[in-house]
Each structure stands twice: as C-alpha cells, then as structure tokens.
C-alpha cells in the first residue's frame, strides 16, 4: 500500500499561488527578505536578526527589554546606516594614524620589522595591536611574558633568515653571537656582495667545506676569528640582522666585531691564511666606522703576515701536484683578491697599492670567447639567474677582467709617483695618452655580457666604475685646462666620467635598491665628488655635485665613514674658499650629530703610549713584526 506523506506547510515568508486551470496544482514563491538598514544595538550585540520596527523591534519586544535603537522615529534608516558607517571609518582612520605615528617613532630596525609584518598581514589593525602589546611588554621588562615574547620574535627572524639564505651553515662551533639563520644569511651576503668584487680573496668551496665539517682543530681555511670577522663585515647592510639587533637591543655588528678581536688575541700572532683574511676584514670594518687609525694597523699587519706566508714559494711547491688543486686555488685567490682589494683602498687614500701585482696565475674564470655565443647570467651557486634566485646576478669573467683593470691602475699610480718632476710635459702627456688608449681598447674588447650598457648587473657596474677610476688616476695630476686630445680638456673628460658613475649609481639603486649591497657601491660617487668639489666655481657642475652628495649620504646610515667623507668634502670647499651649491647644502647638514659608538680604546691611545708598549716587548725578528706585535697588544687592550 502506497504511503502518503503529509504536505508540508510553507514558511510564513512564502506565498502560495494557485494555477487558474487546476486548483490541485500550486506553486510556492519565496518572498524576498526585507533588508534592514540598521539593527538596534541589542540585536547587533547578540548577532540576532532585527526587523527594525520602531520604537521597539520585534526581538526586543519578545524578550521584554528596552530597545536601545538610537535613532529618532522620523530619521530615515538609510541616514542611520551612513552615520554608523561614518563612525566606523573614523575609528579605522584613527587607528591607521596611530600606526603611522608608531612607525615614525620606532627605531629603523624595528620599523622595518613592522613593515615586513604589514606586507604579509590581512589586517593592519591587528599588526598595530600586536606591536602595541609587544611595546607594553618591552617597556615592562619585569613582566613574565617579556622573555618569551623576545625569544619568539628572535627565533622567528632566525628561522626566516635560514629559510631564505642561499648558503646554510651551522653557527657553532664558529660563533656564539647569533644562531644558524643569521650566520647563514651573513655568510650568504658576503659571497653575494663582497666576494663578488670588493673582497674576493676567499675560496668559497674550501671555506664552506671546512665550516660545514665543524671541526675547529682540523680546519685549514676556516677559523672562528674569520667567521666572526665575516659576520661583522656584513652586519652593516644586512636588513634582517639589523632588525635582529633592534629587537634584542644588541648591535650584532658590535658583538661580532668584539668577538673577532678576542679571538684575534687568542691567536697570538699565528701566521695563517684565514688570519690574513680576517685582519683585512677588520681593516675594512674599521674604515666603515671611520676609525682609520686602528684600521691602518690591521691593514699593515695583514699585509706583513701575507708577505711572511710567501705565497709565491708555497705555490711553486705544489704547482705540479695533481692532488693540490684546492690549495693552488686558495693561494691564487688570496694573492689576486688581496691585490684587487688593496688597489681599490689605496686609490681611496690616493696612494699606490702596498701590494704589487702577483706573479702566480689568476684563479678566476676567464670571460667567454666570441665562439661561445651569448652566456647567461648565473646565481651564486652557478645556476641560470632568474627572478626567483636568492642572489644578485653574476657574470662569468668579471673578476678575471677586474684583475686587468687593477694592473692598469697600479701602473698609472706608479707613473704618477715616478713622473712627478715632469708632470704636464709633452713626454708625460704622451705616456698618459697611451695609457688612456690602452683602457679604451680594453673596454672595446669586452663581450656584451660584461658591459654595463648592455648587461647591467652589480659586477658590470663595478667594472665600469673601476675602469673610470683608472682614467681618473691618469688625469689627476694634470691641469683641468690641459688638452688631452683634440677638443677635449682634462676637465671635460673628468666630468664625462663623473656623469657615467653617478648615472650608474642611480640606476643601481633603482634596480637593486640598497637593501643589501657592498661598500664598493660608494666608489663611483666618491670618485665623482672628489673631482667635482674642485670645479664648484662652475655652476654647470652644481647639479651633478648635489647628486653625488645625495648618493653618498644615502649610504651614511649603513657606513659612518660616508658622513666623514662629506665632512672632508665640505672642508675642501671651505679651504678653496668656495661655497657649497645651495641645492647640495642639505646633504651636508647634521654630519656632526651622529656619534660613532664603535670607537675602540686603542684608537684613542696617544702615540707615546704605543711607543712605550712596543718598547717593553721582544725585539722584532723580521721586518713588519713590530707592527703585528703592537697590533695584538692594542687589540687585547681594546676588548670591551
């Protein structure tokens, strides 16, 4: 027997429509729900549907409570909705303004951390609340939640650094200053930027092989001193490291630097390849900080130790050994990399390199030949470079060609010193024209992928800056009005090189930003402003001068020495009785305000104190040992 189910009644919000021909058939049409413009406060709080009846809505009437609908009976519901929306937007606007004020007041490192959170957050107001909560805890360090909050933020930064590093290494047993993530990021940053051109004296494979083995006793090319020196060197521009410093209230650059000095003292003057490399890095760091007197000691000690190693003799002993390929590569990289670095530094001090061109072969990959066809840019690990790469693009052959330029710079500086008595004579001009032609022929022979105008990368940008540096050195001793070639005076050529360097630096900031970069980035602007300051009487150079000052000042937050460079330029202009251009004056303001908090005790030691310290020590056994001994004693005194 067929079971009949009862017909369900329609909901109150439906209407039954009977057909005209057959009353047994009907259709159900659901009425559209009435849109309520503004629910009363009780219904909003209980998240209940409100029928918006006045003066008491249905829900409040059923519960027997007073309906706190805050509108007048004659006020349209649409007006009420707009008023509530206006109140909500005002509150949101106030919160966003509060977030802006907070970003304005926070230190740079913490502000960058907040911005990074905003980039990945769905709700900026939630970020504001979390930062406010964190600030309350930090302002109350006795709170039991403070340590947990601090540890979680630092741990998160360290994990992010480890995840995004191109090279991953263990921090221990090499350093206890930071964790695996921060150390991995700093080591990656070193090989991304400094090793790419400015400090190319480490063999990456040999260094990382020893570091990953984790055995300090047997490591030959990696030491705790060298690792801490590398980390201190890269802490100046690595943004996540600076954020870590801001949260922990410890300056990691300072921590790594002091740790490196302690470890240097423990080495007690031991001569080794990593010690030479570490001392060179400490000199570079001292330059960043503007403590050049202490830096000069590190520089001399590094080069004295390098000469004691006698790299030429070491290379000769293993030249034909098939099992010593790694050792040969390490020695070649040390010799040529140190020569390249010292030539750049020597020019900044307007001195000839303290290290002559090496007599052993270059270890860098040569540029591709024409028959090889187009060669793509690669990443740090040698893979084709793409937008997903965790490093800037590298160009095969860039460091090999940098050695060419370094030799040309050495020869031009050598001629400047040897020919001082005949500067400006026809004999001198003929020699300088030959050197300029040599540089131009070298430039013309470059393949397209190694030219800055056809393949703009950090390395090709540095190559062009370095090439212009050679040309500046050739022209420097001559009078600006000397006609070096038909229609071109020394001043004309110098200004054209200044324009190229400044344009390239502006393009670099646009393409690669200054989120992470090498100190050599300031070389082009430095070379340009050092020329332009002597031509300030010519209004046509004012705009270029202002640009150079701006670009140097942009890096002043990372490298204190940039402020000292601008101070020196200001002094040169004052000595020449030339006013700074009005458009450039703002870049020379407040240069004395930021104190260098990194100065060492040894930097402030008077000369007589140093002499007494040295006089009390053992007699030097060989040339340069006195400087090394003095350095190690001063280093011990400057440990904080």
Image: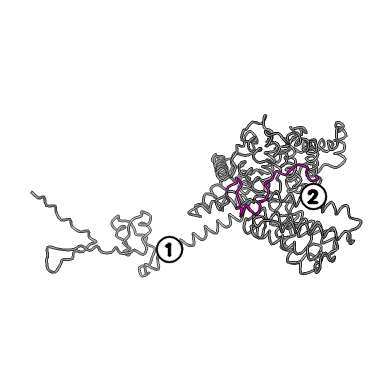
Question: Helix, strand or loop at disc 1?
Answer: helix
* Residue 310 vertical position relative to residue 347 in the rendered view, above or below: above
Where is the C terminus found, in terms of image quarters? top right
Q: Position of residue 132 (x, y in %)?
A: 54, 50
Closer to the camera, 298 or 130? 298
Numbered disc 2: secondary structure: helix
Q: Closer to the camera, 9 or 328? A: 328
Up-down relation of residue 638 to residue 289 (above or below): above
Residue sitting at the far right: 421
The answer to whether residue 137 of the structure is visible from this angle is: no
- Please tell me in which quadrant of the rendered image residue 498 appears: bottom right
- Residue at image mark 1: 84
Q: Which mark is residue 104?
A: none
Q: Label 1 vs label 2: CA separation?
A: 69 Å
- Of 314 and 469, which appears nearest the observer? 314
Nearer to us: label 1 or label 2? 2
Residue 84: x percent and y percent? 43, 63
**Magenta stretch holds residue 369:** yes
Label 1 with label 2: CB-CB less than 8 Å: no
Q: Does residue 29 belong to the magenta stretch? A: no
The residue located at (36%, 70%) in the rendering is 74
User: What span is colored magenta in the figure?
Assistant: 355-383
What residue appears at the point 87 percent right and 38 percent down from the top-left corner? 611
Q: Residues within 10 Å of mark 1 (few under 14, many from 20)?
A: few
The residue lying furthest to the front in this view is 371
Locate residue 37, reporting x and y percent.
36, 64
- Magenta stretch prevailing secondary structure: loop
**Label 2 environment density (alpha carbons within 10 Å; few <14, some 14–19, many ≥20):** some
Pick whichever of labels 1 and 2 is earlier in the sequence.
Answer: 1
Residue 448 percent coordinates (x, y): 65, 57
User: What residue is pinned by disc 2?
Assistant: 346
**Total numbered circles:** 2
């Amino acid at each position: 027997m067929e079971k009949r189910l009862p017909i369900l009644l329609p909901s109150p919000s439906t209407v039954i429509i009977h057909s005209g021909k057959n009353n047994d058939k009907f259709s159900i049409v659901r009425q559209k729900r009435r849109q309520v413009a503004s629910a009363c406060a009780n219904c909003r709080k209980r998240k209940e549907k409100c029928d918006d009846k006045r003066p008491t809505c249905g829900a409040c009437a059923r519960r027997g409570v007073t309906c706190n609908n805050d509108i007048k009976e004659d006020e349209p519901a649409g007006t009420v909705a707009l008023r509530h929306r206006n109140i909500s937007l005002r509150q949101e606007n106030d919160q966003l303004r509060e977030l802006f004020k907070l970003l304005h007041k926070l230190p740079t490192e913490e502000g960058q951390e907040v911005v990074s959170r905003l980039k990945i957050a769905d709700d900026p107001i939630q970020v504001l609340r979390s930062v406010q909560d964190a600030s309350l805890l930090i302002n109350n360090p006795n709170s039991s939640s403070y340590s947990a909050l601090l540890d979680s933020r630092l741990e998160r930064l360290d994990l992010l650094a480890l995840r995004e590093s191109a090279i991953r290494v263990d921090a221990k047993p090499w350093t206890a200053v930071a964790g695996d993530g921060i150390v991995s990021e700093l080591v990656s940053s070193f090989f991304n930027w400094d090793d790419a051109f400015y400090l190319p004296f480490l063999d990456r494979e040999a260094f990382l092989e020893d570091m990953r083995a984790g055995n300090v006793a047997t490591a030959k090319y990696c030491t705790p001193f060298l690792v801490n020196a590398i980390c201190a060197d890269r802490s100046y521009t690595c943004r996540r490291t600076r954020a870590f410093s801001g949260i922990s209230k410890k300056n990691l650059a300072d921590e790594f630097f002091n740790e490196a000095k302690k470890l240097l003292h423990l080495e007690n003057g031991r001569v080794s390849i990593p010690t030479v490399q570490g001392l060179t890095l400490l000199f570079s760091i001292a330059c960043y900080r503007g403590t050049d007197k202490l830096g000069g000691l590190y520089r001399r000690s590094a080069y004295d130790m390098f000469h004691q190693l006698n790299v030429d003799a070491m290379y000769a002993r293993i030249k034909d050994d098939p099992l010593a390929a790694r050792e040969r590569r390490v020695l070649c990289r040390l010799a040529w990399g140190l020569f390249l670095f010292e030539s750049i530094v020597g020019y900044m001090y307007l001195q000839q390199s303290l290290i002559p061109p090496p007599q052993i072969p270059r270890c860098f990959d040569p540029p591709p030949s024409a028959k090889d066809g187009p060669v793509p840019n690669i990443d740090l690990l040698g893979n084709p470079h793409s937008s997903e790469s965790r490093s800037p693009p590298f160009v095969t052959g860039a460091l090999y060609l940098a050695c060419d330029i370094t030799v040309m710079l050495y020869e031009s500086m050598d001629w400047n010193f040897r020919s001082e008595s005949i500067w400006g004579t026809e004999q001198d001009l003929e020699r300088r024209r030959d050197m300029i032609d040599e540089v131009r022929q070298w430039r013309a022979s470059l393949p397209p992928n190694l030219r800055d105008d056809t393949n703009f990368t950090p390395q090709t940008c540095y190559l062009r800056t370095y090439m212009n540096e050679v040309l500046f050195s050739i022209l420097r001793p001559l009078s600006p009005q000397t006609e070096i070639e038909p229609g071109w005076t020394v001043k004309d050529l110098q200004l054209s090189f200044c324009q190229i360097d400044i344009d390239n630096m502006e393009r670099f900031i646009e393409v690669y930003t200054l989120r992470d970069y090498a100190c050599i980035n300031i070389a082009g602007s430095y070379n340009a402003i050092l020329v332009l300051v002597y031509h300030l009487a010519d209004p046509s150079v004012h705009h270029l001068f202002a640009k150079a000052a701006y670009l140097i000042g942009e890096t002043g937050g990372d490298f204190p020495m940039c402020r000292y460079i601008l101070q020196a330029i200001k002094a040169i202009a004052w000595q020449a009785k030339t006013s700074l251009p009005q458009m450039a004056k703002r870049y020379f303001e407040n240069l004395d305000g930021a104190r260098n908090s990194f100065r060492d005790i040894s930097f402030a030691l008077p000369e007589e104190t140093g002499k007494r310290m040295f006089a009390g020590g053992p007699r030097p056994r060989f040339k340069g040992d006195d400087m090394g001994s003095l350095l190690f004693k001063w280093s011990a005194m400057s440990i904080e």
